[in-house]
Amino acid sequence: MTFPPEPPAKRPTGRDVARLAGVSQATVSLVFSGTEAGHRVSDATRERVREAARSLGYRPQAAGRQLRLGRSGMILLAVPNILGPFFGRVLAGVHEEAGRHGLAVVVSSGWGSATLAEAATTSRFDGLLICSPDDSQLGELPPATPVVFLDADPVTDPARPTVELDVAGGMRAAVEHLAALGHRRIGHLRSTHSAYTFRVRQAAFEAAARARGLEVLEAGVSLNEGQAAASSAAYGLLSRPDRPQAVVCDDDVVASGLYQAAAELGLRIPADVAVVGIDNIPVASLLAPPLTTVDLPGEELGRAGVDALAALLRGEPAPVVAPLETSLIVRSSTGHIGT
């Protein structure tokens, strides 16, 4: 016996949302209008409507609304390296929050100031999210274009909002953790890129080491060249007769390169050299031994950036966000000296 196919599930409508939230259809329309008129609705009611929409899986008819507003409904997320695992975390947060605001996301990497300026002056994108920019990638952007910077220098463009990570606090925690374990000669595998986030890491590392009276050994590595470049730089650092007792790496991919170099040199982690990374990407917990690392909340960074950009698109000032908290995740790659 054959059965007729089940009818497709009915798509939830604004009327369904209104009924569940206990408001009128006009109120639902105002909440999702994307215009200043939506602010005639109280914060509590607006949140109740959005919660009802989320529970029903309701998506407003974005195309017609964007056409009325003269918008594309798309935003551009510009990241330095689309293959960088940390930026995958940022993108996850951006996609999640963009969906709540009825926005689509396009991701770009390998861009320069000219590419950004072109993106800002066309009608393809309603706004830009620029994440961890290198100094050479920044240029003058049209003042009318909504732009939010992520993990960037807040003085780059003071008129535009910046969502920062407390990278300095994370680096301090890493150095202090190693010092507390008795390590006195600390290495730093640092990025050679000129991005603000790496300048902050370098300055925080040096200040924390100086405050603890530690001996410092450094080597530079280009993050875009991947694990092979990191392994080569780490090999040179660990081959020194006065090799460091512990090393802080500017990201977890660099740390994985150090693991490879240590294995080639017959060094044990953490007995011969303790290792700390930064980012807390998924591979960090899969390394042997699992990597102690500074967690940078990439998803939260992405969500906060979209929230700020959505406010600008509504004609509102972006919410002021304190630097997002970082935390040291202690695993098995660090231990007391000689253990």
Image (cartoon, rainbow, N blue to C red):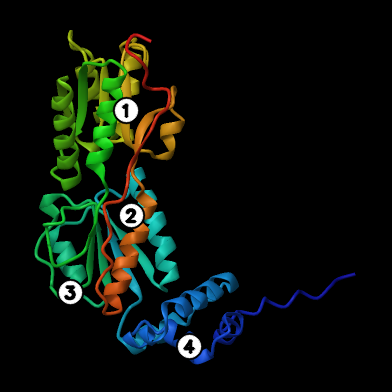
Residue 276 is tagged as 1
Dot 2: element: helix
Sequence order check, earlier mark of 3 and 1 = 3
Write down the quadrant of residue 309 in the picture: bottom left
**Foreground residue, 5 or 155?**
155
Label 1 near label 2: C-beta < 8 Å? no
Residue position for label 3: 121
Distance CA(mark 2)–CA(mark 3): 25 Å
Q: Residue at x 35, y 39 (%)?
A: 327
The residue carrying mark 2 is: 301
Whether 76 is drawn above or below 245: the answer is: below
SS at circle 1: strand
| Residue at 24% over, 53% down | 164
Mark 4 or 3: in front is 4
The residue under label 4 is 27
Closer to the camera, 97 or 174?
Answer: 174
User: Residue flagged by tag 3: what amino acid is it?
Assistant: Thr
Characterize the local packing of mark 4: few (<14), some (14-19) or many (20 or more) Cα atoms within 10 angstroms. many
Front-most of residues 235 and 297: 297
Mark 2 or mark 4, which is nearer the start of the sequence? 4
Q: Is residue 138 left or right of residue 75?
A: left
The alpha-carbon separation of the residues under discs 2 and 1 comes to 22 Å
Q: Among all residues in the image, which is located at the extreme right?
A: 1
| C-alpha distance separating marks 4 and 2 | 31 Å
Tell me which label, 2 or 3, sits earlier in the chain. Answer: 3
Q: CA distance from mark 3 to mark 1?
A: 42 Å
Query: Which comes before the other along the chain, label 4 or label 1?
Result: 4
Q: Are marks 4 and 1 in contact (CB under 8 Å)?
A: no
**Alpha-carbon distance for marks 4 and 1?**
52 Å
Q: Is residue 285 visible?
A: yes
